[in-house]
Amino acid sequence: MKTLLTNIQELLQIRKTNIQKVSGAEMAILPTIKNAYLLIEDEIIKDFGPMENLPDFQYDKKINCQGRTVLPTWCDSHTHIVYAGSREQEFVDRINGLSYEEIANRGGGILNSAKKLNETSEDEIYNQSKLRLEEVMQQGTGAVEIKSGYGLSVEGELKMLRVIKKLKENYPIAIKATFLGAHAFPTEYKENHAGYIDVIINEMLPKITEEKLADYIDAFLETGYFSVEETERIMEAGLKYGLRSKIHVNQFTAINGIEACVKYNALSVDHLEIVTEEDIEALKNSETMPVALPTCSFFISIPYTPARKMLDAGLPLALATDFNPGTTPSGNMNLVVATACIKMKMTPEEAINGATINGAYAMGLSETHGSITVGKKANLIITKQIASFYQLPYAFGSNLIQDVIINGVII
């Protein structure tokens, strides 16, 4: 099956195969072709270029993109899409003045979601989660990482990861699964941290590996949750089972967690609402991708990741949603891109780079996703007629997507 897109007003994010991420000043550059064509063969980008150089292709389907912009689908490298129920009461509690910590201390937060998940059947969790996945695909996401972490027990974590595996099998979108047993300490282990970490390492990890349920391992490295030393134990155990780490860190406090993550060659460090000079130095020249979650900051009114400070220091930055029931009940990457521009002062070029090529890097999909590159997956957003791609973050409340193509097929 060959599909030819013609008269593309602007084709964004065209890259050579050897470019896997962009950093610092490079993030302000978004290579494009105006008045372009693009050829899809089956699931793959076969060719693209200026319309004036359009070869005489044989094709099965032709799409006229007059006045429309085409770009790679969003790569959302940090979500918690698989969960049961919701936590709207906590939303109201925050409006009434309770902090994240106060809600958690009352049995809310992660432990609330864990209780609901463990009371819900695997089939029902799947049925709830697939609706969220379908929604984000319609909003232009073509690759997504999904974490466990609301089980906090051997069976609960396995149940979540099996749901993620089923989503992988039933949907064309690329999905990476991350084991986040170290999301919080269950009530029965509140005073016995070492005991719960032993369960993660000696009971959960062997079974997860046996069933091949995870691609990565994660922990909530934060004051009141998992310490640096505890997270290092988890990262080290993950490596023994072939699971590289992607770590929640610096959401509320900076406790030298980023340095530890870089030491263990974490693929990404996510949240980073608080970033020190020492953190920036630790990330320089590393293979670890910093990931910002701006709609989490928006929803729970905490500081935004200091993007300008990080980019000026030469670092890369990826953008993701943090889609979860408590602190970001939205998987809309369009809103993430807009919020990064409006609140973090990233340019549209920087934000799109963060949500595509750097997002792909942050979940190990650089070879197949994140850019318009010959040989990569034909995962594309075709916008409605717009004046320029600047409208994507500018008109933040409008749906400017006409079509989404995943693996060469309009969904």
Image (tube, rainbow, N blue to C red):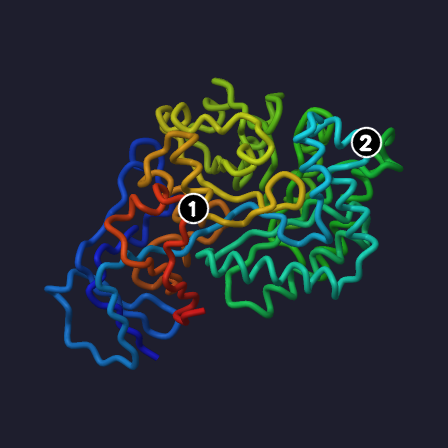
Nearest-to-viewer mark from 1 and 2 = 1
Quick one: quadrant of the N terminus? Answer: bottom left
Between 390 and 259, the one nearer to me in the picture: 390
Q: Residue furthest top?
A: 277
Between 352 and 386, the one nearer to me in the picture: 386
Q: Is residue 305 above or below residue 15?
A: above
Q: Is residue 381 above or below residue 93?
A: below
Residue holding disc 1: 397
Crowding at dot 1, Cα within 10 Å, few <14 / some 14-19 / many 20+, comes out as few
Taking the spot 62% from the left edge, 64% from the top edge, the residue there is 167
Residue 396: x and y, percent? 40, 44
Q: Is residue 388 above or below residue 221?
A: below
Residue 285: x and y, percent? 41, 30
> What separation in Å lies between label 1 and label 2 (alpha carbons)?
35 Å
Assign a secondary structure to mark 1: loop
* Mark carried by residue 106: 2
Quarter of the image for residue 134 reads bottom right
Tell which circle, 1 or 2, labels the residue nearer the N-terminal end.
Answer: 2
Residue 2: x and y, percent? 31, 77
Q: Is residue 333 left or right of residue 21?
A: right
